[in-house]
Image (tube, rainbow, N blue to C red):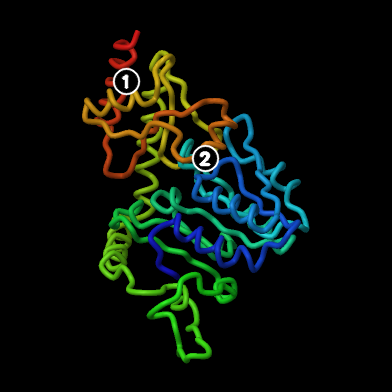
Amino acid sequence: VVFARGTTESINLLAQTLGPQHVKPGDEVLVTQLEHHSNFVPWQRLCEQQHAKLVVAPITAAGTLDMAALSSLISPRTRIVACTHASNVNGAVVDVKAVCQLAQRVSAVTIIDGAQAVPHLPINVTELGCDFYCFSGHKLFAPWGVGVLWGKKESMSALAPWQTGGGMVQSVTEQKTEFQDVPHRLEAGTPAVAEVIALGSALDYLTEVGREQLVEYESFLMHHMVESLTRIPGLSPLLPDGPTVPVLSFNLDGIHPHDVGTALDMEGIAVRAGLHCAEPLFSALGVRGSVRASLSFYNTVEEIDHLADSLRRVSELFR
């Protein structure tokens, strides 16, 4: 485990260390249309720098990752497969175990963005079979500014330092510097001690709550939200087929997502509106942004009903 500021820094760390070592001119890096910009732009930039090709696996019409297309796009030239575990826009859960198995056929390194999955799903990195798995602490009720990059020992050991300074060296002379083994050589400078301790406390808390109970209750809440919101006239949900984490993105006909978000804010409801740092996905869906309601186990049925009632009032107000 390497501690970083979050998923974004973890992926950039990999793009700047693993990338130049592993990707050469003519090679390919595969990402998907479901990715957050944090797991898209670093690989796009790496391909530009290395004169490699960025290959983007499409989604289906149902809003899920097209596994058949992904399988056909992986080739002997594929060096890295970077994939989200769950979309931050439509919540679609990806079968990352199957993705990793496809990548292993051509010895491609697999990097999983787990930011949206870790708060809602039980995660076993050994079962998934990925080389690297990243997530952010604040998604798990820890403070901002701390996250985790997990990697297989052999995969992590191949990474060169990406920042240098104190705490990551074995010895320094005027002629040469010897670096420590991982994880220390990837953690230059003073670590975020308080944030890491708080992350541990947050994980302990979630363990005490119980993952199975958490998943069961959030699934109940998600079902109620889908049932309630999809009955609202003029509401178009971006709801994929198959399993999802408890988020629902939607649009109200004729009303800009930002206007919906502002109106809901005045009702005491916090949603996100816009492109959600996932422009390639919205291009694939053929829409320009959405409103996103996110749930966790601290939410209640009453809050969902308040959201539904507020959306009806917003819809009527703008008509």
Identify residue for label 2.
92
Left or right: 50 as drawn, with respect to 203: right
Residue nearest the viewer, comparing 288 with 198: 288
Residue at left 59%, top 75%?
158
Q: Quadrant of residue 246?
A: top left
Residue at left 50%, top 63%?
13
Query: What is the three-letter code of the residue carrying label 2?
Result: Ala
- Residue farthest to the right, as pictured: 76
Q: Is residue 44 depicted above or below 169 in this figure?
A: above
Q: How many marks?
A: 2
Q: Position of residue 168 (x, y in %)?
A: 43, 80
* Mark drawn on residue 286: none
Q: Is residue 158 depicted above or below 108 in this figure?
A: below
Identify residue for label 1.
311
Cα separation between marks 2 and 1 = 23 Å
> Which is more N-terminal, label 1 or label 2?
2
Element type where label 2 sits in the image = loop
Q: Is residue 83 depicted above or below 167 in this figure?
A: above
**Which image quadrant: the C terminus?**
top left
Q: Quadrant of residue 199?
A: bottom left
Element type where label 1 sits in the image = helix
Left or right: 131 as drawn, with respect to 263: right
Residue at left 52%, top 25%?
287
Q: Position of residue 236 (x, y in %)?
A: 46, 21
Residue nearest the viewer, comparing 271 with 262: 262
**Which image quadrant: the N terminus?**
bottom left
Residue at left 70%, top 55%?
51
